[in-house]
């Protein structure tokens, strides 16, 4: 729930981390308690619309491009030939829009547990939903954890887990069993991409554990990709790629450099750059020299 | 001045940008009105000590490594043989400490207009001041703008402008005349490095203008380097390099890869990565295709 932190502002208070990020709001536009979570929509002074779920900032009009582009394009230019893509979560449809920009993509399934997120996004973030009627898109509302369990082995090329923090409905998405099911559905050459929280706050906890869980689940390669995201805690976020047999640190650099669509953040240079690992992360993740 | 934003928190309110970042504080340790500005020191719950100047977050124990390492090491590994280094501003001495890690450096002058910043740093951030008595270090308190005017032409290899936002005492540091004086003091092969605000907030204003001013002042090459900095607005910050004749987008990659000192963020991969330019910045700075 949004905290009464300062009058006229929407604030995400990170009690555990002792920091708060606030946006000046001009109006509260909507508030819906779905079966799963509280979804609030604000108009802000400088970030456009803001969606907040259970007190956590999810999306603003102004800065969502960073997150959506990095999740979608880093994953799709890493896979050699992405045709069948599954998005778990992603109810605001921004990742779906980016995925559908790739001409190789033949079919995308988007499975968010909470239909209300998509309904609110259609109303307040129509630009994120502009590709929802693409004939390649299949938008479903169901439990992604169960769906992936029932998935035929090797039937997907890319899975993007575009989820909330590992509390509430998303907790089962940060787990070895879930990763094992994903890797089975992907087959040996498929790619798993998942949002993985803040490098400053979560390297020694969530990110480190994710690499351990991915390895135990059968990933031969995994790599965390940092990027800026002003409305998320610390303004510095990450996503993590994994595969059984693909080297997730190489990508289709020429295709990326000649991408047939416009982006705001992502390009081939930025993709290569995002693979660089800060020293403290190298050490924490056991990649370093000391 | 710190705003009364929320009880028990120190908040930097960006009225113009409609965003606020707050840190939970456990105590106010000091507050000094110097001749130039109000300097406050807090103990925080999770970021260690915090220095605030005129309401803007300057340094915390926890995350200052990002800013200081990127300013110092990116500059010093870009110059082919940095021996004579000038730091303008930098009163907390964190940049000085990083510069002095380079064995090529023979002499460093640090010129901050406000002695109180250094006195407060010595008391509350002693780790940043641990190299202040290095025989190569010359810590002075004076007007850097005048000092650089009086500097002999070609007498410096690197100038690092580690200053506050372009308001108050730092306003003259974001100006064509100042850049012309710096480039003269550096000679044709010298390198100028300056902190340059947030890519999200300031690309179309401060950063764009800085490149124009640098070019007008005689820089043949200039390049902006983004990096994460959680306590600064948006959590995403930048510094900008310029030179008359050096190509500031190449660097001593082997020396960087074999650096004889420990860092927390910077390494050769991160240096190369920081040279990548996001699409919206390419377009705004006239580097792009469209």
Image (spheres, coloured by chain):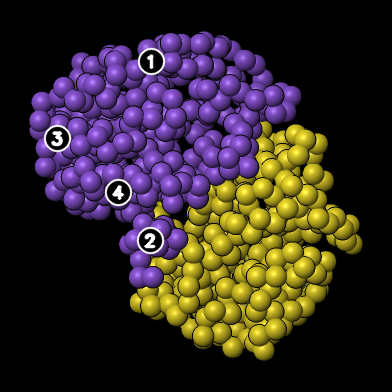
Chain colours: A yellow, B purple
Seen at 54% across and 59% down, the residue is A66
Direction from residue A187 to residue A91 in the image, left or right: right
Across and down, in percent, residue A96 comes to 63, 74
Work out whether disc 1 and disc 2 sit on a shared chain: yes
When the figure is inspected, residue B26 is found, relative to residue A52, above or below; the finding is: above
* Sooner in the amino-acid sequence: mark 4 or mark 3: 3
Disc 1: which residue: B114
Direction from residue A134 to residue A2 in the image, left or right: right
Q: What element carries label 1?
A: loop
Tag 3 subunit: B
Q: What element carries label 3?
A: helix
Direction from residue B129 to residue B33 in the image, left or right: right
Q: How far apart are the alpha carbons under marks 1 and 4?
A: 29 Å
Q: Tell me the mark number nearer the camera, choosing from 3 and 1.
A: 3
Disc 4: which residue: B212
Disc 2: which residue: B282
When the figure is inspected, residue A30 is found, relative to residue B87, above or below; the finding is: below
* Sooner in the amino-acid sequence: mark 2 or mark 4: 4
When the figure is inspected, residue A78 is found, relative to residue B75, above or below; the finding is: below
């Amino acid at each position: 729930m949004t905290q009464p932190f300062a009058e006229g502002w929407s604030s995400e208070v990170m009690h555990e981390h002792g920091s708060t990020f606030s946006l000046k709001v001009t109006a509260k536009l909507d508030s819906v308690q779905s079966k799963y979570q509280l979804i609030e929509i604000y108009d802000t002074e400088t970030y456009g619309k803001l969606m907040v779920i259970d007190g956590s900032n999810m999306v603003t009009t102004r800065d969502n491009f960073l997150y959506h582009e990095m999740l979608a394009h880093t994953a799709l230019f890493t896979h050699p030939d992405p045709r069948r893509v599954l998005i778990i979560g992603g109810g605001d449809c921004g990742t779906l829009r980016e995925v559908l920009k790739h001409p190789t993509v033949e079919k995308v399934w988007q499975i968010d547990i909470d239909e209300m997120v998509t309904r609110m996004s259609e109303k307040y973030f129509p630009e994120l939903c502009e590709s929802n009627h693409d004939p390649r898109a299949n938008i479903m509302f169901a439990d992604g954890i169960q769906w992936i369990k029932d998935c035929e082995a090797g039937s997907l090329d890319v899975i993007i887990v575009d989820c909330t923090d590992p509390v509430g409905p998303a907790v089962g998405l940060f787990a070895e069993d879930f990763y094992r099911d994903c890797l089975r559905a992907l087959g040996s050459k498929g790619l798993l991409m998942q949002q993985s929280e803040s490098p400053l706050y979560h390297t020694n906890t969530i990110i480190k554990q994710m690499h351990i869980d991915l390895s135990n689940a059968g990933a031969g390669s995994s790599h965390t990709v940092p990027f800026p995201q002003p409305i998320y805690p610390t303004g510095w976020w990450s996503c993590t790629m994994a595969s059984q047999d693909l080297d997730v640190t190489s990508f289709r650099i020429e295709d990326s450099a000649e991408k047939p669509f416009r982006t705001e953040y992502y390009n081939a240079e930025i993709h290569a750059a995002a693979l660089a690992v800060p020293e403290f992360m190298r050490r924490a993740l056991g990649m370093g020299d000391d």
